[in-house]
Amino acid sequence: EKQGFKHFMLKEIYEQPGVVRSCLENYIDSHWTAADHRHSPIRLNLSADLYADLQQIQIVACGTSWHAALVGKYLLEQLAELPTSVQYASEFRYAPSPLTPNTLTIGVTQSGETADTLAALAMEKQRRSGHASEFQARLLGITNRPESSLGDLVPHIIDTHAGIEIGVAATKTFVAQLMAFYCLAIDLAQQRQVIAPAQLEQLLVGLQQLPAQIEAVLESQERYIEQLAHDFAETQDFIFLGRGINFPIALEGALKLKEISYIHAEGYPAGEMKHGPIALLDAKVPVVAIAMPGTVFEKVLSNAQEAKARDARLIGVTPMDEHEAAETFDTVIPVPHVDELLSPIVTVIPLQLLAYHIAARRGLDVDQPRNLAKSVTVE
Ligand code: F6R
């Protein structure tokens, strides 16, 4: 069943190009060009009442799905111009935001069975029950299991079609959730007419290139990251830095590492380092910085230099050319140059591999980490 891979997690990491491809096939019209700007290239089959008069979006989720939701917020705000809040389901259920009629609530859960996420959505459904029917309909689930408790609870679903995930650490379902958010944000941006057709066309071209780009990262970097993992088998603390759309990827890189390797890791928005956490840094704490060209590129590089000045070993995930990168970082994990908005899909891959190989190097049970279960069905 592992098809020659040592663990399900590694097999599932390698399934990601296929997962992205199937999302593109299922949900995106590959023939769309800017000339077709009157209709959306996205086919999510969501009913019109979900979108009508929307003024804001709130998203509830846990763990890795919460990280996908943070990327979703970036896309929904920057592409579709819809104010979006992201909340931990376990917090939201005891302190919900005040009810406003033009809000779409989205629950993200790959298993469709996470108790806190279901409870938060059940509460939203209950709160809306006495209101107009359009308002009651504004509940959407993003899941890998449409036939789950989530599917029974909410009127609309985006199926992420990633295939069953066995490794406890979510990998391919995360990438599939990101794809769902690209589709949703692009669809909303097109329908609200807040995106230029040329930008939309460029994004679609970029999306179509992602499967090959993920393959390129897997092929060119896996061996290298496996060797790199030797250096970190005894490391006790790690810091992951990112900004903008890659801040949630820093969080995800840290979560992957801690849950399967049991190494303490923290993800931070790079600009926050100087407000406290920089005090942790010394030669024993490696820092992984995600440095992708775009709005915050220079800022991330200068934040990374601040870490290096504290003797931290600096690892860059970046498409910078070899020489420039070597001047900035102690170690470079090269990734392809992609549109900033699409970059999380390529930056998360090396971080999954890094977590995997460090855990495997430590001889740990990667697919069944201690104290964790694939779906958390208790509060
Ligand atoms: C991390 C991980 C967990 C889950 C979380 C939510 O690798 O697997 O953090 O992401 O328990 O699970 P779902 O998405 O099933 O609601």
Image (cartoon, helix red, strand yellow):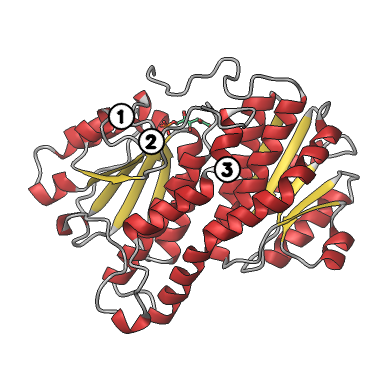
Along the viewing direction, whichever of 196 and 298 lies nearer the viewer = 196
* Label 1 sits on residue: 118
Of labels 3 and 1, the one closer to you: 3
Q: Earlier in the sequence, mark 3 or mark 2?
A: 3
Judging by the rendered image, the residue that carries numbered circle 2 is: 109
**Is the shortest distance between ligand 1 and the CB of mark 2 under 8 Å?**
yes
The x and y percentages for residue 51 are 22, 59
Ligand 1 within 8 Å, label 3 CB: no
SS at circle 2: loop
Kind of residue indicated by mark 2: Thr
* Residue type pointed to by label 3: Tyr
Q: CA distance from mark 3 to mark 2?
A: 21 Å
| Any part of residue 329 in sight | yes
Q: How many badges with numbers are in the image?
A: 3
Mark 2 or 1: in front is: 2
Q: Residue at x 19, y 36 (%)?
A: 125
Q: In the picture provided, is 248 more to the left or to the right than 105?
A: right
Instruction: Estimate how packed mark 3 is, as few (under 14), some (14 to 19) or many (20 or more) residues with alpha carbons within 10 Å.
Output: many
Identity of the residue drawn at 83% across and 26% down: 234
Disc 2 crowd rating (10 Å Cα; few below 14, some 14-19, many 20+) is: many
**Nearer-the-camera pick, 120 or 100:** 120
Q: Secondary structure at mark 3?
A: helix
Quadrant for residue 34, please give it.
bottom left
Q: Which image quarter: residue 201?
A: bottom left
Q: Residue at x 79, y 27 (%)?
A: 236
Residue underneath mark 3: 14
Q: Earlier in the sequence, mark 3 or mark 1?
A: 3
